[in-house]
Image (spheres, rainbow, N blue to C red):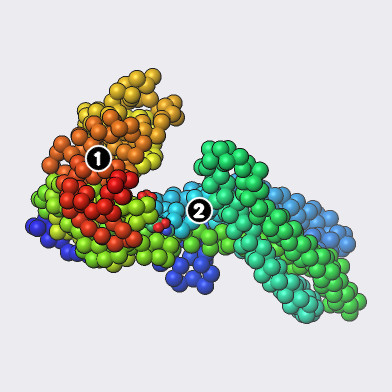
């Protein structure tokens, strides 16, 4: 136990992947928006500076124009020429700054999106199979691709919003500087404008949330349909499936129309309110001109500042983009809130690979599917797990190598709870093979080598031989170097690659969950002979065939999520119920 003497404390999943992401913010997405902006802080500040500078030039222009007009009316031509040139500069500067801003906001969005996708993907993989149990794969992809891109636009939009708020505010201040009564005239009607913006933000927030949810739903159904294309073709249900996948489309269209209506209504209200405010300012300015408090140039400047002060069009655009980004951030936050798997720091002591389940229970879909299982698999021995379909064999296999944690109880390997083992220690100690292994790794050889460590070409070939895969791999055009996409595999070939992968990596424990179900009897016989021809590894084999159970040292018989009996296959075979599991009398 010396090597395990480290504390039993656990470390959380990789940075930014732990749970509890939502605690703190009012809206679940606020924290994500803050993080994305913080990640692009320098660029966001640069963008805001560019935008504010452009707005500064825009705000100076009316004053300069007014002054130029007054100079021209006073026939001070030489001085007026300098001011005309200044006005030209003030017209050109915002255009040049806008162009710079466009380039910078594009690259800022791309970087922020890439950062968020990276973080999100790392988190989803750290959560493991639980992520796809909670979110449909298509929905997850939508969150990772579309919603992350919406969030990525937030830093640029926020910087732009600073400017779009600065322009109206600057306009009001400038009106006040020309004549306080102008500002008073404007502010009298301003609350109407504020109400209009608030109503727009609320209504568009609702639309965006529902729109993005429906997009995720369609993507989820689409991925299901693509994955089940063969079943759909065999069932002849193409039309029905198309209808099912696209069923949320009318809802999506409804939300799209609703969004247009919200924007149209905001535009119509703005068209009514904005000119009224501008006319109010102009009326006050005209009155003050007749009183001699303002010059003609001041009147010109006031008319332009009134336009700036009521310039909510850009603000509405930014508000819409922020609402979309915030809603998308909420959907991203939901994924990040799913806690990542925490690992300990312990290493394994020298030991034979004794696996022990103590009082283990598991829940799936809110239901207890495995209850109070106590089981010891002595190091170097093999255990077959049998039982009717749906009795919890795969769930037990998941818990035995910590693909999932039990709801209650503890699983230990050579006396160390799996939860306390370091990530790499655990993955090097336990190897898995499944019924439908994924061809990850680029090439066929890479698929076998895919794991916590690269076993090297010799170990890959040796594992392939033990899994009866070497022969068919060598017949491929490039042998082990054949790219996966150039080597369509049968179910049995695919399973043999999965077995080879497990053989090449498993340390002390090898867990086979239905991993030989597609093999022909002869191949299955050879593979299980190789599997059981060792006493250096503990083996847990989910079995449906009596012959597989017969070759194991012991059998664990599950019934209704409980451990019904354990013993040798020979002993259990005396029980007619046990024989019935395998269709024997
Ligand atoms: N993600 C999940 N959500 C809800 N229920 C689940 C989930 N995974 C498994 N279950 C349920 O848990 C029970 C046990 O499932 P498990 O896959 O372990 O059965 P099994 O004994 O391996 O079956 P089979 O022999 O058919 O593969 C089943 O009733 C199954 O429906």
Q: Secondary structure at mark 1?
A: helix
> 412 and 290: which one is in front?
412
- x%, y% of residue 522? 28, 30
Residue at (53% x, 47% y) in the render: 224
Q: Is residue 536 visible?
A: yes
> 451 and 536: which one is in front?
536
Residue at (42% x, 53% y) in the render: 124
Residue at (56% x, 59% y) in the render: 328
Residue of label 1: 547
> What number is the disc on residue 509?
none
Q: Residues within 10 Å of mark 2 (few under 14, many from 20)?
A: some
Residue at (66% x, 43% y) in the render: 239
Q: How many marks?
A: 2
Q: Which quadrant is the N terminus positioned in?
A: bottom left
> What number is the disc on residue 136?
2
List the single residue furthest toward the front. 585
Q: Left or right: 561 with respect to 234?
A: left
- x%, y% of residue 430? 23, 47
567 up-or-down from 258: above or below? above
564 up-or-down from 181: above or below? above
- x%, y% of residue 278? 83, 70
């Amino acid at each position: 136990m010396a090597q395990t003497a480290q504390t039993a404390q656990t470390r959380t999943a990789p940075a930014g992947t732990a749970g509890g992401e939502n605690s703190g913010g009012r809206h679940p997405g606020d924290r994500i928006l803050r993080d994305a902006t913080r990640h692009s802080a320098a660029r966001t500040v640069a963008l805001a500076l560019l935008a504010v500078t452009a707005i500064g030039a825009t705000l100076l222009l009316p004053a300069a124009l007014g002054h130029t007009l007054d100079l021209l009316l006073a026939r001070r031509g030489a001085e007026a020429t300098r001011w005309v040139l200044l006005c030209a500069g003030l017209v050109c500067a915002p255009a040049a700054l806008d162009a710079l801003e466009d380039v910078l906001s594009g690259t800022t969005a791309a970087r922020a999106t890439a950062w968020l996708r990276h973080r999100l993907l790392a988190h989803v993989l750290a959560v493991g199979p639980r992520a796809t149990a909670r979110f449909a794969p298509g929905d997850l992809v939508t969150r990772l691709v579309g919603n992350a891109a919406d969030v990525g636009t937030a830093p640029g939009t926020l910087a732009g919003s600073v400017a779009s708020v600065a322009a109206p505010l600057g306009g009001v201040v400038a009106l006040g500087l020309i004549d306080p009564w102008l500002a008073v005239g404007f502010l009298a009607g301003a609350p109407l404008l504020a109400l209009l913006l608030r109503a727009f933000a609320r209504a568009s927030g609702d639309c965006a949330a529902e729109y993005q949810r429906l997009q995720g739903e369609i993507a989820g159904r689409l991925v299901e349909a693509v994955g089940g294309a063969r079943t759909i073709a065999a069932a002849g249900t193409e039309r029905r499936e198309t209808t099912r996948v696209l069923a949320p489309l009318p809802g999506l269209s409804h939300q799209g129309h609703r969004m247009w209506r919200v924007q149209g209504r905001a535009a119509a209200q703005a068209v009514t309110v904005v000119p009224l405010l501008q006319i109010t300012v102009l009326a006050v300015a005209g009155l003050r001109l007749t009183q001699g408090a303002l010059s003609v140039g001041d009147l010109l400047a006031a008319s332009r500042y009134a336009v700036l002060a009521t310039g909510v069009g850009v603000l509405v655009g930014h508000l819409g983009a922020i609402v979309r980004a915030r809603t998308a951030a909420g959907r991203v936050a939901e994924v990040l809130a799913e806690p990542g798997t925490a690992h300990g720091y312990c290493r394994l002591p020298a030991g034979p690979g004794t696996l022990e389940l103590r009082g283990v229970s598991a829940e799936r879909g809110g239901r207890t599917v495995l209850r109070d299982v106590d089981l010891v698999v002595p190091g170097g021995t093999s255990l077959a797990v049998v039982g009717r379909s749906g009795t919890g064999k795969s769930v037990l296999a998941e818990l035995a190598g910590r693909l999932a944690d039990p709801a209650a109880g503890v699983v230990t390997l050579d006396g160390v709870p799996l939860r306390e083992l370091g990530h790499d220690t655990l993955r090097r100690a336990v190897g898995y093979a499944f019924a439908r292994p994924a061809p990850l790794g680029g090439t066929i050889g890479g698929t076998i080598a895919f794991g916590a460590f690269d076993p090297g070409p010799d170990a890959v070939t040796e594992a392939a031989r033990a899994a009866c895969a070497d022969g068919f791999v060598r017949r491929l055009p490039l042998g082990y170097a054949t790219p996966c996409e150039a080597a369509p595999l049968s179910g049995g070939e695919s399973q043999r690659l999965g077995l080879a992968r497990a053989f090449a990596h498993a340390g002390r424990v090898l867990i086979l969950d239905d991993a030989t179900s597609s093999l022909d009897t002869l191949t299955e016989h050879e593979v299980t002979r190789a599997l059981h021809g060792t006493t250096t590894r503990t083996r847990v084999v989910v079995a449906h065939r009596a012959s597989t159970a017969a070759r194991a040292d012991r059998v664990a018989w599950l019934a209704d999520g409980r451990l019904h009996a354990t013993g040798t296959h020979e002993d259990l075979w005396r029980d007619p119920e046990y024989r019935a599991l395998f269709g024997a009398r």
